[in-house]
């Protein structure tokens, strides 16, 4: 192979890398699929990654498997193959590949593998592996992999939460399908109860997905993964969609896009939500399926961040939820109003409901489900007492105030119990000291 030919190949791969960095997968794939690159290992791996990102799981996974059989073990190749299996909802194959990597790796590479294993095992309920994975993850550099490191913290807190709830009886009855981003992981092991009985969530996690992805005109990884999930959900199902929070983070998504381009936030919100809901209706809505759409929870207030930026984000989330609820009503879908339940009087999130800065405790979803089903049911029922129709809105408000008062009283009780324990300990110490001094005085 001539030097000039090698240099031209190198230029093509670099050009493809430029497209990959800006997430222009179609343009990158057009270069990587060229005849002169078909014997180039690096180009073929990157081409397979582009195929997966564009939703062509068969082509991408077939290419990666072929290269795996030819080259043998290669960390990057195996990691991309595992991610591709996860994207295609092939969790057994993903876990098998990751377990093989666990046996070969150590240090930070092992930690990276363990993060993926941790998330899959949490979704699948394989809790016996969690302790080992938490031990391995200690070696992960959170600066290099901030998103994956935050997953580890999030799941560790969820595991601790359920360990403290060990007395709870988990009742497996009807399934309730949850398709969402990382927020969906909080619903694992939750019991959702309503007038029809108790439901057990089955989680379908789409890592890093935004509502924006589903409304995009071009095919993409997120849309393709949702369509793969659709294949395993039976007719006559309850399906909850939990997306939108990532769209509304201050450092990415809609807010950043509007600041950069000058597009009106109202226009961007309407365009994103319309595309998102249209995708759901076209692909999941049937006469028998019940579709629930989750609102975006209120954001936590941080003392060390700009008040102006936080108020802007809070207002954007409020506007998003207002338009989302308006569209849900028009389209005859069902609301799952997390926002209303998580909101405090200052338009920020109630801190006691958050397991970390971005995710809610499991109990919040149980409460929202009960509340929303009550609200849906009441629309079909009118109750009169002494000739007067019950004001359900006031009843809801009074009930919520009662729940909040109970929670505050419970926290206050715990605080007083702790103070009492300290007081008793202090009293014992005082009596012992007094006896000691009396004894020394007598002697």
Image (cartoon, helix red, strand yellow):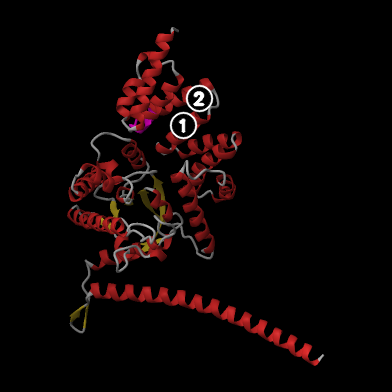
Residue 74 is situated, as x and y percent measured from the top left of the image, at: 53, 27
Would you say the residues marked 2 and 1 are in contact, meaning their CB atoms lie under 8 Å apart?
A: yes
Residue farthest to the right?
A: 443
Res 362 seen here: yes
* 331 left or right of 1 in image: left
Quadrant position of residue 53: top left
Report the Cα–Cα distance between label 2 and label 1.
9 Å
- The quadrant the C terminus occupies is bottom right
Q: Which residues are magenta?
A: 52-58
* Crowd band around label 2 with a 10 angstrom C-alpha radius: few (<14), some (14–19), many (20+): some
Q: What SS does tag 1 mark?
A: helix
For disc 1, the neighbor class at 10 Å (few under 14, some 14 to 19, many from 20) is many
In the rendering, which numbered label is found on residue 443? none
Q: Position of residue 295 (x, y in %)?
A: 29, 56
Write down the residue under mark 1. 81
Which residue sits at x=32%, y=65%? 341
Q: Is residue 237 visible?
A: no
Q: Any magenta on residue 4?
A: no
Q: How many marks?
A: 2
Give the mark, 2 or 1, whose residue is nearer the N terminus.
2
Q: Nearer the viewer, residue 228 or 353?
A: 353
* Position of residue 19 measured from the top left corner of the image (x, y, whole percent): 33, 28
Q: Position of residue 111 (x, y in %)?
A: 55, 41
Residue designated by label 2: 68
Name the foreground residue: 380 vs 417.
417
Residue depicted at x 47% and y 44%: 143
In the image, 266: left or right of 249? left
Q: Residue at 30% of width from left, 27% of height from top?
A: 26
Q: Look at the picture and state if 423 lies above or below 64.
A: below
Residue 259, relative to residue 2: is it above or below? below
Name the outermost residue toward the bottom: 442
């Amino acid at each position: 192979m001539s030097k000039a030919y090698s240099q031209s190949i190198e230029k093509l791969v670099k050009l493809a890398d430029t497209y990959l960095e800006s997430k222009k997968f179609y343009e990158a794939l057009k270069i990587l699929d060229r005849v002169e690159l078909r014997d180039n290992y690096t180009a073929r791996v990157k081409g397979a990654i582009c195929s997966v990102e564009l939703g062509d799981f068969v082509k991408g996974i077939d290419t990666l498997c072929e290269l795996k059989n030819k080259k043998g073990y290669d960390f990057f190749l195996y990691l991309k193959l595992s991610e591709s299996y996860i994207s295609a909802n092939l969790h057994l194959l993903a876990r098998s590949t990751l377990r093989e990597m666990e046996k070969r790796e150590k240090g930070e590479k092992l930690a990276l593998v363990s993060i993926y294993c941790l998330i899959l095992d949490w979704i699948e309920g394989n809790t016996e592996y969690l302790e080992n994975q938490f031990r391995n993850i200690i070696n992960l550099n959170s600066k290099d992999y901030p998103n994956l490191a935050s997953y580890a913290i999030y799941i560790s807190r969820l595991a601790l939460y359920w360990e403290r709830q060990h007395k709870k009886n988990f009742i497996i009855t009807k399934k309730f399908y949850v398709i969402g981003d990382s927020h969906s992981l909080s619903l694992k092991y939750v019991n959702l109860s309503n007038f029809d009985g108790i439901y057990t969530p089955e989680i379908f996690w789409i890592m890093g997905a935004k509502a924006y992805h589903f409304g995009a005109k071009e095919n993409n990884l997120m849309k393709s993964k949702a369509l793969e999930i659709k294949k395993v959900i039976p007719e006559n199902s309850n399906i909850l969609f939990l997306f939108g929070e990532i769209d509304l983070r201050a450092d990415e998504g809609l807010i950043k896009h509007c600041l950069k381009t000058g597009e009106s936030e109202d226009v961007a919100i309407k365009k994103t939500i319309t595309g998102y809901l249209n995708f759901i209706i076209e692909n999941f809505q049937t006469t028998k399926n019940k579709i629930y759409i989750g609102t975006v929870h209120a954001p936590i207030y941080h003392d060390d961040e700009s008040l102006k930026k936080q108020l802007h984000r809070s207002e954007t989330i409020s506007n998003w939820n207002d338009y989302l609820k308006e569209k849900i009503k028009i389209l005859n879908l069902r609301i799952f109003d997390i926002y209303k339940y998580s909101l405090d009087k200052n338009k920020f999130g109630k801190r006691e409901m958050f397991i970390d800065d971005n995710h809610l405790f499991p109990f919040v979803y149980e409460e929202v489900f009960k509340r929303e089903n009550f609200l849906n049911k009441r629309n079909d029922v009118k109750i009169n007492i002494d000739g007067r129709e019950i004001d359900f809105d006031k009843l809801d408000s009074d009930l919520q105030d009662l729940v909040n008062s109970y929670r505050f009283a419970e926290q206050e009780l715990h605080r007083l119990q702790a103070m009492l324990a300290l007081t008793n300990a202090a009293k014992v110490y005082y009596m012992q000291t007094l006896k000691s001094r009396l004894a020394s005085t007598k002697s």
